[in-house]
Amino acid sequence: MTNSTVSSPFPTTVVTGGTIGSIVVGCKLQVLHGQPPEYRKAEILSIRPTATADDPARSEYYVHYSDYNKRLDEWVAPERLNLLGEIEYPKVKKPKTVLAGVGKETGKGSEPGTPSGRVSKNNRKSNLSKAATTGKGAETASTPGASGSNKRKAAAMEEDSASQEQGTGMNGTTPTIQVQGEEDEDEEMANGESVSQEQILDENGDVFSKEQEIEKLRTSGSMTQNPHEVARVKNLNMIQIGKHEVETWYFSPYPVEYAYLPTLYICEFCLSYFPAVKQLSRHRLKCTLQHPPGNEIYRKDDISFFEIDGRKQKVYCRNLCLLSKLFLDHKTLYYDVDPFLFYVMTQRDEDGAHLIGYFSKEKESSEQYNVACILTMPQYQRMGFGRLLIAFSYELSKVEKRLGSPEKPLSDLGLLSYRAFWAETIVSLLVEQQKAGIELSIDDIANRTAFQPQDVLHTLQNLNALKYYHGQYVIVLSDTVIKNAERAAKKKRREVDPKALVWKPIHFTATQLRFL
Ligand code: ACO
Ligand code: ZN
């Protein structure tokens, strides 16, 4: 199967009405979306043939809805394209400079929008689209303080999207999934054991070597700069994990043999992945895990946290990164997990400790980041678990006697969650201290919460709580802010209980921190 790489023959870019045969990668037109269906402007990112006996030329179209988050991107049938309306054709392919300009459009991927997905749809409320109109989400792409490495990465992303525009995306081949016979062959397709755990393949089937990856990790913090990582076309649509069927949001570099499956089956305890439910069932007969590997460092009610060293549990941590990449667009690490610790949050029942979410943390962060990547599995989102993960990350920082901050850039959802957490924590601290007649400075707040002063300052600015008075800045909370905080405090939420944390920071020696 090949992608459409043909440039438009049209001398002009916008035409009213066109034929299905004229639609090429890069065209922008109205596409039916949602329930009830409505037309939204979308860009064709890829085309793949889906020939039928009646219609041998039939294709499917992978579209990105303009001004919506990339997680809404999807394959659509030709009937959903409005061929009677305006169609914007891409300019005839020319030198690189033109392509680089086109590539910038990937920036749209980080704009907020309503989420897709069977699971997530139910869990998300309208605040996100509100953020879109107020432009809050746009900050994710240009968060101040984003490191030079991020800028380099952005450049790589632009280059990459330019190449994707030319149709060199991952749709070039549809791998044949060989659902293998019995026992032994079975394991060959099982991720955790033999296939591609040491060699991550990109969407073109090329091996991304450990050496290349390590070099990139050395020079770019926790984020890989594998340009293919920011592939524009999703390779998986659905995963089944535990009792949940979850629609995926973004590309994740699972080995190419697993792409295009209707569903990827994941063992919820060891995170190995399988192309068929039968293989997962057989694996479950042998897999003895009922909780993540590593030390349980926190237990309160049915919630536990496990600390997992990327160096000691490579396969599990890589599988976790592959899984989380399905829901994280802008950054992730997925190959060299050695320099990270993973804090996995689970909920316990009679079947075991089920994965709810996690965050990763660099063993040594030169920028004082206390979280690298953070994720709540979509089926558990908007239930307060993200808040619990964030609160936990700061509890660890308090024990370490350090001030921490999440790695930048944040995603749209990350920004919303952190902002809400920072604001709530700071306001309730200030109100409580005010009642006791104690005044707090920004540094005092930082020291009590383990937030970095920058985050305290930005939060107070967002709350409009910094007033210039008699030649100096003072913190003043408005009645509305206090009422909102009181309302939020009344919500029944799980809190982290510091007494349930049994943990000492691990100090790694230089040798332990060396990449091997
Ligand atoms: N719309 C509006 N507000 C939201 C949304 C949303 N979709 N999601 C979270 N919030 C805000 C709300 O204020 C919410 O409080 P409320 O529910 O009382 O209104 C608050 O954040 C906390 O919500 P939680 O339910 O505790 O958070 P959740 O479990 O959904 O997890 C997380 C948040 C981790 C960001 C999740 O959305 C996620 O995993 N997203 C995909 C991966 C991602 O983007 N991770 C962050 C990347 S940045 C980084 O890694 C450093
Ligand atoms: Zn397993």
Image: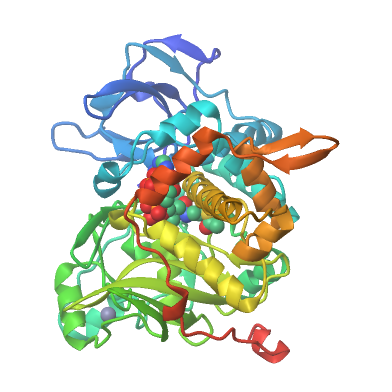
Q: In terms of depth relative to the viewer, which is nearer, 96 or 358?
A: 358
Residue in the picture at 59% in, 77% down: 399
Q: What colour scheme does the image use?
A: rainbow
Give the side of residue 183 with respect to residue 434, left or right: left
Residue lying furthest top:
16
Residue 255 can be seen in this image = no
Percent of width and height locating residue 256: 38, 62
Image vertical order of residue 357 relative to residue 311, above or below: above
Give the side of residue 218 with respect to residue 136, left or right: right
Q: How many labels does the image show?
A: 0
Percent of width and height locating residue 218: 70, 71
Q: In which quarter of the image is the C terminus?
A: bottom right
Residue lying furthest right:
471
Image vertical order of residue 468 relative to residue 304, above or below: above
Image vertical order of residue 200 relative to residue 93, above or below: below
Percent of width and height locating residue 500: 41, 79
